[in-house]
Amino acid sequence: MAEIIEMPKLSDTMTTGTLVNWLKQEGDSVSAGDMICEVETDKATMEVECFEDGVILKLYAQEGDSVAIGQPICAVGEKGEEAPAVESGGDSVSSGDDKAAQETESKAQPAQDEASSQEPKQAPKPAEAETKAEDAQKAEEQDVEDEEKAADTTEGPDIRVSPLARKLAKEKGLDLTLIKGTGPAGRIVRDDVLKAEKEGTAKPQPKQAPAAASAPAAPFIEEKTFKVTNMRGAIARALVGSKAQSPHFYLQIEVDGKPITDLRAALNHKLTNLPPEQGGVKFTVNDLILKAATEAVRRVPAINREWKGDTIIQHGGVQLAFGVAIDDGLLTPVIRDAHAKSLRQIAHEAKELIGKARNKKLKPDEMSGSTLTVTNLGMFGISDFYGIINPPNAAILSVGATVKTPIVDENDNITIGYRMKVGLSGDHRVIDGAVGAQYLSALKDVLETPSVMLV
Amino acid sequence: MAVITYRQAIKDALAEEITRDENVFVMGEEVAQYNGAYKVTEGLWTRFGDKRLVDAPISEAGFIGLAIGSAMMGLRPVVEMMFFSFVYVAWDQAVNNASSVRYMSGGQINVPLVIRGPANGGTNVGATHSHTPENLVANFPGLKVVCPATPADAKGLMKSAIRDNDPVFVMESTVLYGEEGEVPDDEDFIIPLGKADVKRKGKDLSIIAHGRSVLMALQAAEELKEKHNIDAEVVDLRSIRPLDEETIIESVKKTGRALLVEENKPYSGVGAQISHLIQRRCFDYLDAPVHRLSAVDAPAFYSPPVEKVQLPEAPLIIRETLDMLNVKR
C-alpha cells in the first residue's frame, strides 16, 4: 500500500515550502530516516526525512514548486506499484496565490459581520421618506456606479472612457492617456476629446527618437521580475507587522570608538596567529559590540522586555540576535544566553551562525526566541541609521562605522577623534525614552571602558 | 385647432369612430347610462344609444371574452377597463385568447379589439388599483400597446387603435384626463401605431419616456435649459409595441446619452427593453451609460406623502441628468 508523503510543517510560521531539490528520484529505493528532498521555508532550507521504506513511486511536486503544508509531494510504495492519484492532479501543488486568496477571504469575513451588525436600522423618519424613495429609484443606478468604482481600484491604470469618446479619439488620432476626463468618476467623454482636439493637447508622442539617432541603447541593467521567496515574504510580513504594531522611537548616542578599536587591535595582535587549541581567535568589532550590548543589559534590564498585550515580560537572560546580510535577504541568528558567555564564546558562536546563515543551514530554533537585536552596517561605511524592531524585542541597536573626525577634547583642543554612532529604535509600548537613553548611556560606558567586558 | 382636454380628445375619437364605422361599439362597466366612471364616455349613450354604448356586468372575463368573440365575427369593440388593474381578472381572455386568434387561425380571423382605460398610479387608490401593465401586455406577441401623453396623441392613437385589425391596449391616465392641449379638428386625424414623437429637440441628452413621464421630462428639460444650459431632447415613445426603434436610435446617436423615464416598475420594465436596444445599436455613440428612472420597485404606496415620491417627477429627472453629465447640483 503506497504512502503519500506530504509537505511537513518545518517551522512554526511556515505555511508553504519551496521544494528546492529532490535528493531521491522516482524509482529510487528509500528507507526510513533517509532524506528525500530539501525544502526552503520562510526561515531556512531544510532536508525532509522519509519515514517509510520502499521505492519512490512518483514525485508530485517539481523542483521550484511552492507547496502548501499537507499537500502531497511524493508517494512511496512497493516496486511496481501504481502511484495513487492525488486530488486534482498537478493542481494539488498550491501556489502562494491560493493562500493569499484564502487570507483575503478570511479577512473579508469581519467586514461582512460588521455590515450585518449594522443591519437593524431604524425605520425611516417621515422627513427622510422622500429622499429614501428617490434613492430607491436611483438604487439600481447607484449599484452600477459603485461597481464601476470598485472595479476602478482593482483595475489599476486603465482609463475610463465612453465608447463615443473612444471612437472619436481614434478617428482624430488622439492619445486618450493624455486627455483628462470630466465625466462621472473621471470618465473621458465626447466634450473632453473635442476640447483636446481644439487645444492640440493629446497628439500622440513620437515613440522613438528621430531617425538620426542610432540603434536603441542596450539596456542599462537587466530588467526582470523576481518571485518573492519564502524568506523575503517572511521578512516583509515580520517587518510590516513590527512597524504597524510597535510605535517606534529613535535615540542615538555618539561613542568614542578608540578604546574598543584599541582593545580589538591588542587582542587580535596576540591571538590571531595562535592555533585555536592555544586560544587563537580573531575578534571582529561586531563581536565586541555584541558583548558590550549584553553587558549593558545587566545595568539596564528594562531593555530586555517583551510586550504581551496584557502583560510585559522581563526576560531573565539575554538572547541576542544579530543581523546577517545574505545574498537575497537578511537573517537574525540568536546567540543563546549571551549573558553567560565570554567574549571568546560569543565570537566563536557568532562566526558559526554567520556561516550557517550564508549557507542557509540555520535551523528555525537558531533564529527564534531573541530578546534583543543588534544590527551593524559599519562595514559598509554607514555612519548612522536606525533599525526596525525585530519582534518580539523591545529594542534594536544599530551600530555605525567608527569615523575619524575632528573633536574637541576635554582640554578644549581640537584633536582627531574616532567616533562611533549607536542608534536605538525602541517599542514605546514597552519602554520609554528614558529607559532607551539609560541603556545607550550604559552601552557607551561599556564601549568606552571595554575592559569591563573581559571580567 | 381646438384646445381640449385629454378626456375630451378620447371621447371625440370614440364618437368619430362610432359615427364613421357602424361596427364600432363601446362596452364596459358604467360606460353608458352612468356616462363612465371617469366621464370619458359622457353623453355618448344619449347620442348613440344602447347598441353602440353597452353597459356590462362586473365581469371583465365575461365581457372581454364577449368582445373578442364579436371582433372575430367582424365587429370592432372598444372595451373600457374602469381601472386597467381590473384586466387581470380577464387575463386569459385579454392576453391569451386575444393575442393568439390570428396566429392560430392561420391569419384567417382577426381580433380588431381595443381595450382602453386608465393605467396609472399616484392617485391614492391603493396598490391593487395603480398598475401600469404596459410592459406585461407588450410581452405578448400579437398584442399592441400605446400610452398617449397628450390630448392630440390620445385622440390620434385611439382612432388608429380602433381602425387596427389587431388587439390594441390603449393605456390612459386619470391624472392626464384633465390636461389640455391642441388637437387637430380633422376627422381623419390619426397617429399611426409604432411612431414615436420627438416632443422637444435637444443635443445634450435624450430623455426617452412614455405616458405622464413625458410631461415630467418636458418640465425637467425646461429647467435644465434655464438653470444649467443643458439641452435635453425629449422622445415620447407613444407606442410601446410596436416600438419606434429608429427614432430612439437616431436621437441617442445624436446626443450620445439616454435617460429612460417611466412610471412602470423597473424590473423587466419598458426601460429595460429600450436600454438593451440602445446598447446594442448605439454602443459606439454612447458618451455615458444608459440611465433609468422608474417607479420605486414596490406595490403602490398608499400613504399620501410617500406615494408622492414613488413615481419619477421632474426634480428627480433633473437630478439624474446632472449626475449623468457630471454637473454639480
Image (cartoon, coloured by chain):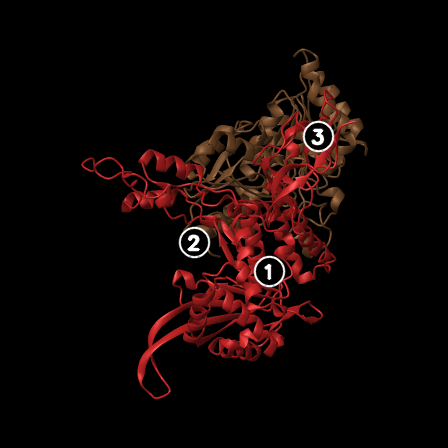
Chain colours: A red, B brown
Q: Secondary structure at mark 3?
A: strand
Q: Nearer the viewer, mark 2 or mark 3?
A: 3
Residue beneath label 1, please? A334
The single residue placed furthest to the left in the displayed view is A212
The kind of residue on which mark 3 rests is: Ala
Closer-to-camera residue (A283/B53): A283
Where the C terminus of chain A falls, by quadrant?
Answer: bottom right
Dot 2 crowding, Cα within 10 Å, few <14, some 14–19, many 20+: some
Q: Mark 2 = which residue?
A: B228
The residue singled out by tag 3 in the image is: A75
Asked if residue A392 is positioned above or below residue B265 in the image, the reply reads below
Question: Is residue A385 visible to us here?
Answer: no
Please name whichever residue, A394 or B128, is drawn nearer the observer in this view of the structure: A394
Q: x, y percentage for residue A30? A: 70, 31
Nearer the observer, disc 1 or disc 3?
A: 1
Left or right of residue A449, residue B141 in this image:
right
In the rendered structure, the residue with mark 2 lies on which chain? B
* Image quadrant in which you'd find residue A379: bottom left
Spatial distance from mark 2 to mark 3, Cα to Cα?
75 Å
Residue type pointed to by label 1: Val
